[in-house]
Image: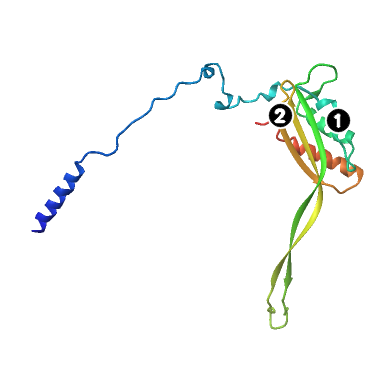
Amino acid sequence: MNRRLALILLCTGLAACQGSNPYVASSTPIPPAPPQAATTFDRSAYPAPQRDYGRYRNWAWLNGRLPSGSAWADSAQVAEAVSNALDQRGLRPVHDNRPADLWVSADLHLEKRLRQERDDYGYGGYGGYNRYGNGYGMYGSVPVVRTYEVEVVVVRVNLFDGGSGQPVWSASAETSSRGSLSERADALRKAVEKAMQAYPPS
């Protein structure tokens, strides 16, 4: 009896599936392309061509201006540090009226940073060595985190294509603002060198 009932229900379900599909496929034709589409080149549809950094051989300051200095380091110091870093990468300054392969700009400014230091202070402990053997005790430490503000010098170097004027490369690095004049000059040189480490990009 149960088998017959199951068979009847199954046949009824299959019969219900044989009905017409209420969903009808339909489509509208694609509209024609505008007339200017045949002559317009969409650069955004293609990846940018890989830049050949090897073709850059020489450089000049952007708009003929030396980098701006500050009370921490003057303009000539910044210019010398940047020029030395570029020279180490095979880029020579242009000394005549030829167009430069690269335009260079650099700036120097002070910024504030928050630093944290953690100290572990120990506590407890008693006992010691006596005639009965080693003493006993209990030791532990409590972490103390201190936050303080420091002033740093940030050096940024920007390179632009000499032909198009488009940005080619940019990087920055920071160093401590403390120290004597000779220490500042050394810190500036190291900061510029650090900023230029990744040039040319691989």
x, y percentage for residue 42?
A: 56, 23
What amino acid does circle 1 point to? Leu
Between 24 and 144, the residue placed more toward the observer is 24
Quadrant housing residue 3: bottom left
Q: CA distance from mark 1 to mark 2?
A: 18 Å
Rendered-image quadrant of the C terminus:
top right
What amino acid does circle 2 point to? Pro
Quickly name the residue at label 1.
66
Relative to residue 36, is residue 174 depicted above or below? below
x, y percentage for residue 66?
A: 86, 30
Where residue 167 is drawn, which disc sits there?
A: 2
Between 89 and 115, the residue placed more toward the observer is 115
Quadrant housing residue 25: top left
Judging from the image, the colouring scheme is rainbow
Quadrant housing residue 52: top right
User: In the structure shown, which secondary structural element does the residue marked by tag 2 occupy?
Assistant: strand
Please report the residue visible at 55 percent of the width from the left and 26 percent of the height from the top. Answer: 45
x, y percentage for residue 175?
A: 80, 45
